[in-house]
C-alpha cells in the first residue's frame, strides 16, 4: 500500500544543512590540502538536474538464498587471515580476503554472512576501491537493483552511487547544528516500497580521527522487549516518508536537487528476513512518521519509546572506526546506523561512497498483517 504524500503532517526535528549547493564539487575540492590533485576527484559529488520517474516494483532474488545451497556457505572465508566478531550479536571484522576477487559464489556467500551477522567490515581493500565506479555498479548489481537516491550527490555520470561529503569549506550532509548530538539512527531510504538490503560503503578520504559510524542490531533491540509487547508490535504498521528529505533539498540545501518526487510507504513495525527468518524491529527516527490506525498520542508514545530504546541500547551496538581502504557491508533490513560528525573543527575531508541495491518489500513478521 502506497499512501498519498499529502497525508503526512508531521515534521522532522529541524536539521540544518549548511550552504554549498553548487552543481558539482568546486576546484578547491578537487585538490588536497597540500595543493596536490585529489586522487578521487573523479568521484566528487555532482548534482545533475536530470529527473527520474517513480520507481516501479520488481522481483528481488536474494543471493543469500543461493548460498544456503552451497556445501560450505562460508568457504569464501577459507583464505582469511583474521575473522573477529566485533560483538556477540553484531559485526565481524575480516582481513585477508580480497573482495575485488570474489566470484559469483563468493559474493552469494558474502550476502549470507552479512544477513547472519548484520555487519561485516573488511580491511585492506585498496584494489576494490581503486577499481572505480564501473566496477562498483557491477558489484552492486549482483545483490539487487541499484537505487538512485532522489536528492544526494553522485559522481558525474554515475547516479546509482550515493556520496557523502564534508570538508573545511563545504558539506553535502545533514547536520543537526541545533541538537546536542549528531547521532541520528536510521535505515537507508526506508520510505521506498522496496528499501535496500545488502549495502556496501567505503570512505575515499577520512579525518585522522573521528567520523566513525555506529551500528545497532534491530534483531537484538527487538529481542530485548517482552514477548507480549513484541506480539503487539507485530500487529502494527507505520508510514515511512521521504517528504522532509526532499523539502530540505528544495530549500536550496544539500545540492538543491530533487530528481524524483518523494514517496511514502507503509511497512511493518516488525519484519522478517527472507533468508535467515529472523525478526527485526523496523522503525527509525529519520523516516518513520506514524503508526497506522493509532491516534497521534498513541503512535507518538510507542515510536518514541522504540526510538529511545534504539538510542540507548549500547549492548546492541558496535562502532566502526574508519582506516584507509576499509569496506563495510551491512544489511539494512536488520540494522540501523548513524554517522558521527565529531571532526568538523579539524576541517579535514570525509568523502564516502555507498552502493545501495534494493531488496524485497518488507515482509511482516505476522502473516496476518495486511500492508
Image: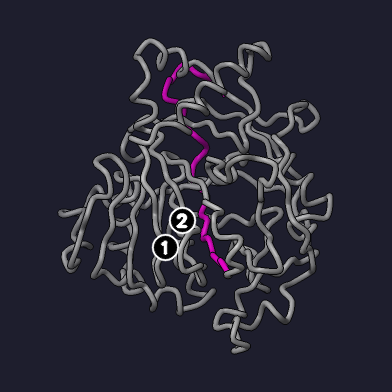
Image quadrant of residue 51? bottom right
Say if 186 sits above or below 106 in the image: above
Q: Is residue 325 left or right of residue 113?
A: right
Q: Looking at the rendering, which quadrant does residue 192 occupy?
A: top right
Task: Identify the residue at the far bottom of this view.
Answer: 36
Q: Is residue 75 above or below residue 334?
A: below
Measuring from the top left, give residue 3's x and y in whole percent: 71, 29
> In the displayed structure, does residue 224 sit left or right of residue 283?
left
Q: From what the image shows, is residue 209 above or below residue 272?
A: below
Write the start and end of the magenta stretch as one range.
349-371
- Marks 2 and 1, the one that precedes in the sequence: 2
Query: Do tag 2 and tag 1 residues touch (Cβ < 8 Å)?
Result: yes
- The residue drawn where x is 47% and y is 17% is 233
Q: Which residue is mark 2?
A: 212
Magenta-drawn stretch contains 352: yes
- How crowded pointer 1 is (Cα within 10 Å; few <14, some 14-19, many 20+) is rated as many
Question: For the point 38% across and 10% down, which residue is it?
Answer: 228
The spot of residue 159 in percent (x, y) is 65, 65
Residue 173 showing in the rendered view: yes
Q: Main secondary structure of the magenta part?
A: loop
Res. 193 visible in picture: no
The quadrant the C terminus occupies is top right
Q: Quadrant of residue 154?
A: bottom right
Describe the element under mark 1 as helix, strand or loop.
Answer: loop
Q: Position of residue 126 (x, y in %)?
A: 39, 77
Q: Which residue is mark 1?
A: 322
Q: Is residue 194 above or below residue 291?
A: below
Total marks in image:
2
Residue at the spot x=39%, y=26% of the render? 222
> Is residue 202 one of those drawn in magenta?
no
Q: In 3D space, how far apart are the residues under numbered discs 2 and 1 (Cα atoms)?
A: 6 Å
Please provide percent x and percent y for residue 98: 30, 72
Amino acid at each position: 500500500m502506497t499512501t498519498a504524500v499529502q497525508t503526512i503532517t508531521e515534521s522532522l526535528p529541524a536539521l540544518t544543512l549548511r550552504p554549498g549547493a553548487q552543481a558539482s564539487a568546486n576546484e578547491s575540492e578537487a585538490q588536497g590540502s597540500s595543493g596536490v590533485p585529489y586522487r578521487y576527484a573523479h568521484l566528487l559529488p555532482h548534482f545533475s538536474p536530470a529527473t527520474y520517474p517513480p520507481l516501479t516494483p520488481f522481483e528481488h532474488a536474494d543471493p543469500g538464498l543461493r548460498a544456503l545451497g552451497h556445501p560450505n556457505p562460508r568457504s569464501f572465508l577459507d583464505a582469511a587471515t583474521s575473522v573477529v566478531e566485533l560483538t556477540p550479536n553484531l559485526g565481524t571484522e575480516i582481513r585477508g580476503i580480497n573482495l575485488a576477487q570474489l566470484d559469483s559464489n563468493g559474493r552469494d556467500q558474502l550476502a549470507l554472512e552479512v544477513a547472519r551477522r548484520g555487519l561485516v567490515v573488511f580491511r585492506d581493500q585498496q584494489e576494490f576501491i581503486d577499481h572505480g565506479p564501473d566496477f562498483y555498479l557491477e558489484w552492486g548489481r549482483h545483490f539487487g537493483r541499484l537505487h538512485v537516491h532522489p536528492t544526494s550527490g553522485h559522481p558525474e555520470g554515475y547516479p546509482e552511487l550515493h556520496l557523502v561529503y564534508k570538508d573545511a569549506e563545504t558539506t553535502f550532509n545533514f547536520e543537526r547544528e541545533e541538537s546536542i548530538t549528531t547521532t541520528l539512527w536510521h535505515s537507508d531510504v526506508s520510505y521506498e516500497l522496496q528499501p535496500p538490503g545488502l549495502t556496501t560503503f567505503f570512505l575515499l578520504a577520512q579525518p585522522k580521527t573521528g567520523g566513525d559510524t555506529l551500528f545497532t542490531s534491530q534483531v537484538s533491540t527487538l529481542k530485548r522487549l517482552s514477548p507480549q509487547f513484541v506480539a503487539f508490535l507485530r500487529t502494527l504498521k507505520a508510514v515511512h516518508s521521504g517528504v522532509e528529505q526532499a523539502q530540505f533539498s528544495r530549500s536550496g540545501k544539500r545540492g538543491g536537487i530533487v530528481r524524483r518526487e518523494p514517496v511514502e510507504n507503509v511497512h511493518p513495525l516488525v519484519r522478517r528476513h527472507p533468508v535467515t527468518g529472523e525478526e527485526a524491529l523496523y522503525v527509525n527516527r529519520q523516516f518513520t512518521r506514524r503508526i497506522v490506525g493509532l491516534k497521534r498520542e498513541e503512535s507518538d508514545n510507542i515510536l518514541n519509546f522504540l526510538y529511545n530504546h534504539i538510542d540507548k541500547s549500547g549492548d546492541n551496538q558496535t562502532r566502526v572506526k574508519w582506516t584507509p581502504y576499509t569496506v563495510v557491508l551491512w544489511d539494512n533490513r536488520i540494522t540501523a546506523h548513524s554517522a558521527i560528525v565529531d571532526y568538523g573543527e579539524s576541517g579535514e575531508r570525509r568523502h564516502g561512497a555507498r552502493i545501495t541495491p534494493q531488496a524485497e518489500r518488507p515482509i511482516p513478521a505476522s502473516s496476518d498483517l495486511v500492508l
